[in-house]
Image (cartoon, helix red, strand yellow):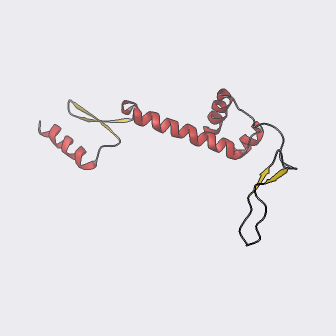
Amino acid sequence: MSTTSSTPMPTHGSFQLIEAVVERLDGAPVGERRRWSDEFKAQAVAAAMAPDVNVSALARRLGISPAQLFGWRRAFRKTQDEAQSAHPSSQTLTEIVIGDAIIRVGQDIGEANLHRIIRAVRTA
């Protein structure tokens, strides 16, 4: 570690600017961050999304931190939600059959609007 002083220390109580340059602190970890392939992440997330899976135990078996696997799952769910909201046609539709008429509605329809549609179909 090296230090440099920009000005001599004044005697009237102001401060002195000191610059410290640290190459590496003793005890700091040496090494690079591990990188996981997208294929490995996808396989790990798919296994973690299976029913009755202990995600922490799965992460330990894969040799990764449970927090890392939970983060990958959260990111996967977020991208799924964004993709689904970007393509409303991929949302689940509910079909209601009244006589010869078939009404298909998405999950976002309000109850009042659904009542209006059903009344219109029944009176037609």
How many circles with numbers are drawn on the protein?
0
Horizontal relation, residue 72 to residue 65: left or right: left
Nearer to us in this view, 31 or 53: 31
Nearer to us in this view, 106 or 14: 14
The picture places residue 38, in percent across and down from the top left corner, at: 64, 28
The picture places residue 81, in percent across and down from the top left corner, at: 47, 38
The picture places residue 39, in percent across and down from the top left corner, at: 66, 27
Nearer to us in this view, 13 or 111: 13
The picture places residue 35, in percent across and down from the top left corner, at: 72, 33
Residue sitting at x 73%, y 72%: 13
Residue sitting at x 57%, y 40%: 75
Image quadrant where residue 94 sits = top left
In this view of the protein, can residue 25 be seen by the observer? Answer: yes
Residue extending furthest toward the right: 26
In this view of the protein, can residue 52 be seen by the observer? Answer: no
Nearer to us in this view, 55 or 75: 75
Residue extending furthest toward the bottom: 12
Residue sitting at x 20%, y 33%: 99
Horizontal relation, residue 88 to residue 4: left or right: left
Residue extending furthest toward the top: 39
Horizontal relation, residue 36 to residue 84: left or right: right
Horizontal relation, residue 52 to residue 34: left or right: left
| Rendered-image quadrant of the C terminus | top left
